[in-house]
Image (cartoon, rainbow, N blue to C red):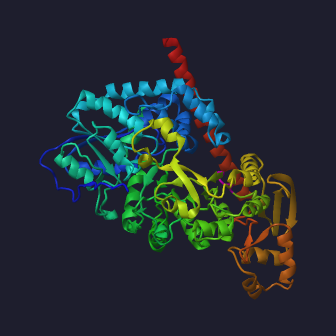
Amino acid sequence: MRVLRREESFDAPPGRVAVSRRVALVCTPFQTITLPSLALGTLAPLLRQQGHHVDVMHLNLDLAARIGVGLHEELGAYDAWLRLLGEWLFADERVAPGALTERDYGAYLRAHRWRERAPALEHLDLAALRREASDAIDRWFHAHDWSSYDVVGFNVMFQQLNASLRLGARIKDASPGTRIILGGSAMEVPMGQPVLDRHDWLDAVFSGYAERTLPSYVATLPPRLHRVVTQETRVEMDELPVPDFSSFFEAVKATGLEGTAVFSVPIETSRGCWWGERNHCIFCGLNARDMAQRNKSGARVFTEVVEQSRHGKPFFATDNILPLEYFDGLFDRLIAEGVPFDTFYETKSNLRLAELRKLRRAGVSSLQPGIESLSTPILREMKKGVSAAQNIWFLRAAEELGFGVAWSILYGFPSESPAEYEAMAKLLPALAHLPPPLRPAPVLLERFSPLFERASSYGFSNLRPTDAHRAAFGAAPGLAERAYVFDFEYEDAREPDRYTKALNGAVSDWMAARARFPAPRCEVLRVGPLRLVLDSRARDRVGLALPSLHRLTSAECELVTLTREPIDERKLRAAWTSAEPVEEVLERFLARRWLLRSDGRLVRVLMCRDEPTVSAEVRRAALAGRQRGAHFLRRLRVRLSAWVRKRRQTVAV
C-alpha cells in the first residue's frame, strides 16, 4: 500500500510585513478570456494589504489576441479539455518529455473514442498552433523583467500546466533566485505532488485555497518545499477582500479584445455545496475534500455587487450551488434598492416559482439548475434529490421567466436501464419549444467523485488515466496521481453509446430546431379578450410543424393557472371551480401534450408568460434579434482580426 506523505502547511497569515516583496501572479492559456481569474483577483489584494507589490498578468488574453478569440475559446472548451489539446500544444521535451509528436497526436484525435463529438479538432493546423505556443513563451519571457520579482506564481486550472511550467522554467533558468510556484484546482492533493517531484526547479506547489498559506510563504520565502502546501483552516468568507480585476479589464482594452466577447465579472458568494454535504452526487468531482458549505453574508455580497458594478459588465457566480439564505434578505435588498445583479448562478431544480420570480426581479439572468436527466430512476441513482417532473417543470418555468438555462443529459451509469433512454427520446418532441440540453454526454470518471472513490462497488474496472494524459504529459512518473479524469471498463460490458443513439439523435434535432427561426412554439398568447395557444411542435419527431391555433375556454384557462407548478390530480380536483368537468379538460391537455404525467404529478409544458401579449412577444423577438446581431458582429470582428494578422504575417515573410 502506498503511504501518503504529509503535506507542508503554512497557516495564520502574518500582519503587515517588514520586507516588501515583488510578486507576479500569472494566468496562462487556456482559461477562458471572458472572465478574469478569481483566484488571482482575490490573492493580489491580500498580498498588497501586507505591503507587497503585486502585478497580475493575464497572458491568455495575449494569445487570444494573436490567434483569435474563437480559436482560443475552442481550445479551452470541453471537447479540447477532454483531450488535453491545450496542454499538448505547450508540451516540450523539458516539461513533458515523451508527449506525442504532431503526427501521433493527430492520430490520437482521429482514434478518440468520442471522435464524432469533436470533428473540428481533427482539422486544426496542429503544427501552426504549436509554433504559436512556442512564440508565445518567447514573447512572454522577453516582455517582462522577471528577475525583478521575488515570487512568480501561476494559477493552474484549465489546461494551464504545461504553459505555466514552460514559462516558469525559462524564468528560473534566467533568474535562479526568483521563486516559481504553482497553485489552483489542478494542483489539489494528490495531483500536485508528482508535478513538484518531477520538476526540481519548482519552489512550491499549493493545494486548494491559499488565502492564508500564500501570504505566509511570500513573507518568509523558505527554501524549496518538498511537499505540497495545504491550508488547514478555512477562511471566513466575509474576511476575504473584494477581488481586484482592474488589470484584467485594462489588458482587455490594451490587447484590442474589447467587444470581441461578452466579458463578465466573477463573483464568489459561497464555497462548498450544501447538497453535497448531505448527498454527494455520484459523478461530481468538484470541491475535492472541501464540501462544507460556507457563505458570504448578504450584506457583504450586496457591497461587492455595488463595488464591482463599476466595470459595467454582467456577473458570473462561481458558486457550486446558490445559497438558499439569500432568498431571505439579499435578493430583497437588491430589488428594493434597484441594484441590478445580472448574473449566472448554479442551483438545484427544486426551487419554487416564487423563488425563481425573485431571482429574475433581482437581475439574475442565467441558471445552471443541475439538470442531468429527465428520468427519475436515473436521477435517483445519481443521488440528485430531484425528480424528472421537477426538471421538466423547471425548464418551462425558466423559459417563461426569461432565464437562460444550461443543462445536460448524462448517461453511462452502471445500473441504469436502457429503456429509460428510449422513454426520454419519445418524450422530447413534446419539449421541443423549451431550452435543449448542451448535449447528451457520457459520464466521466472524475477524481474525488463517489464513482471514482468506490469504482469497483459501482461496477467499474481497469481504471487508468485517459490517453489524453499520456499524449500531453508523456509517460510521467505518478501519472495516475496527476490525472483528474480516468478511463475504465464496465464489468457487465455494457455499451451506453449504443442504447442512447436514438436520444442523441433527438437532442441533435432539438438543438438544431431551437437555433432556427422560427423555432417550435407551444405558448399562450393574449389577443384582446382571447387567450390563444400557438403550437408548432412536430408530433412524432423533435422539430417544427405547421402552426395550429387553439382558443382557450374559461375552464382551460383555469387549468393553465392551477398547473403553474407540478400538482397531483387529487389536489387539482379539490381546487377545481369551473362548471366543465376537470376530467374532460385534463384529457384535452394531455392529448395535445400541453400537460404530461410524470412521477404521479401533472406537469404543464404549455408556456404562459406573465405578459402573454403580442406586443410583448414582438419586444422579445426584437431583443433576441439584437442579441443575434451582436453575436454575429463579435464573430465577424474576430475573423477579421485573424485575417488581418495573417496578411501582416504573410507580408512580413
Image quadrant where residue 288 sits = bottom left
Residue 372 position, x and y percent, is 62, 60
Rendered location of residue 494, percent (x, y): 68, 55
Horizontally, residue 548 falls left or right of residue 316, namely: right
Residue 156: give x, y in percent of width and height: 39, 44
On the rendered image, what quadrant is the N terminus found in?
A: bottom left
Residue 552 appears in the rendering: no
* Dominant SS type (magenta): loop
Question: What percent of the width, then of the height, locates residue 80?
Answer: 55, 40
Q: Is residue 245 visible?
A: yes
Picture quadrant of residue 52 = top left
Q: Give the side of residue 493 with respect to residue 586, left or right.
A: left
Instruction: Name the side, left or right, on which 470 lies relative to 234.
Output: right
Question: In front: 166, or 399?
Answer: 166
- Please check the rendered image and state whether residue 438 is part of the magenta-colored stretch, yes or no: yes
Q: Is residue 436 left or right of residue 245?
A: right
- For image coordinates 13% across by 45% down, the residue present is 19
Write down the region rendered in magenta. 435-439
User: Against 452, is 127 above or below?
Assistant: above
